[in-house]
Image (tube, helix red, strand yellow):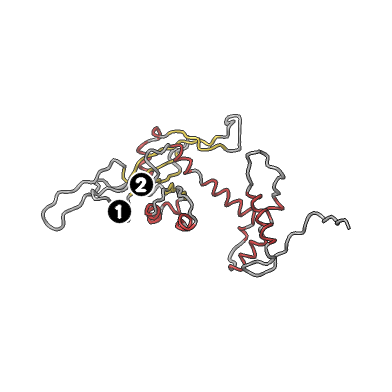
Amino acid sequence: MLDEVTDAWSLPQRPVVADAGYGDATEFRLGLTERGLTYVLAVSPAATAHPADAVPVTPPWAGNGRPPGPRYQDKPVDLKTLVMNAGRSAGKFVVWRHGTKKSPGNPTASMRSRFLALRVRPDNRNIARAADGSLPECWLLAEWPPGATEPTDYWLSTLPADIRLRDLVRLAKIRWRIEHDYRELKDGLGLDHFEGRSWLGWHRHVTLAAPRPSHLHPAPPHPTSPCAGLTLYAVLRELQALLAVWTGVCHTCRQPVQTPTPTTTPQASNP
């Protein structure tokens, strides 16, 4: 899918953001790097890495067998240990966006927490080492909220070493937008009602579910702000009208699609 988006669609490359289901897969991270894609991926605290300043050392050769190659003297440790060793004092408070729930104590509805960013070298047998035995370096980002006894979330990122902490946090937290849109698709379109149907059934289900937003969430006649664009539901309403008047027949299941009835009565022309 990523290859299709970047190649076939000719879209500009952007950092890939995903949850730990993807971030914990070393092969997935390596695949992104091979394609020249940077990422900010959530990972579990049990993943292991070396500190960035760890240096491989070549053991002395006894003269028998193959000469040993360079290796790290210490075993890798889990990400939680690396962050705990750095301590909460190494973190900084960052506001990554402003929400809608304002309060007397938070009049701007700012979303704020403490974050630590460390340079580490993730360890895995599938990760290629350089000639000197060193592993690639990347960012380890951890969120350690005030009052928490330990960090709550972890990310690995291959964004540049000089990136600002605020920008790194913003990308790590941008998944809220994905989750919001997914919830809108389920609630607004009824996509969560589709379970175990065939492709034909799926297409019929989407055809029936598509008109829901125009009835449940009608778009305002004029934007509330001169800078406002089309909302999700406004876009869906336009697409629904377009699909309904194309041919009146679903192009996949060949079932008739009832076209909307005009809301205005045509005026009789003068003889």
Q: Could you tell me which quadrant the C terminus lies in?
A: bottom right
Identify residue for label 2: 78
* Residue farthest to the left, as pictured: 63
Task: State the residue at coordinates (39%, 34%).
Answer: 90
Task: State the residue at coordinates (55%, 49%).
Answer: 179
Residue 22 picture location, percent across and down = 44, 54
Identify residue for label 1: 128
Task: State the residue at coordinates (23%, 48%).
Answer: 132
Q: Looking at the picture, tell me which residue is in the foreground, 200 or 13.
A: 13
Secondary structure under tag 2 reads strand
Residue 111 picture location, percent across and down = 53, 37
Secondary structure under tag 1 reads loop
Task: State the residue at coordinates (67%, 53%).
Answer: 238
What's under tag 2, amino acid-wise? Asp
Instruction: Describe residue 127's horizontal placement relative to residue 8 as left or right.
Output: left
- Which of the two marks, 2 or 1, is nearer to us in this view? 1
Residue 268 picture location, percent across and down = 86, 57
Instruction: Describe residue 205's horizontal placement relative to residue 118 as left or right.
Output: right
Label 2 or label 1, whichever comes before in sequence order: 2
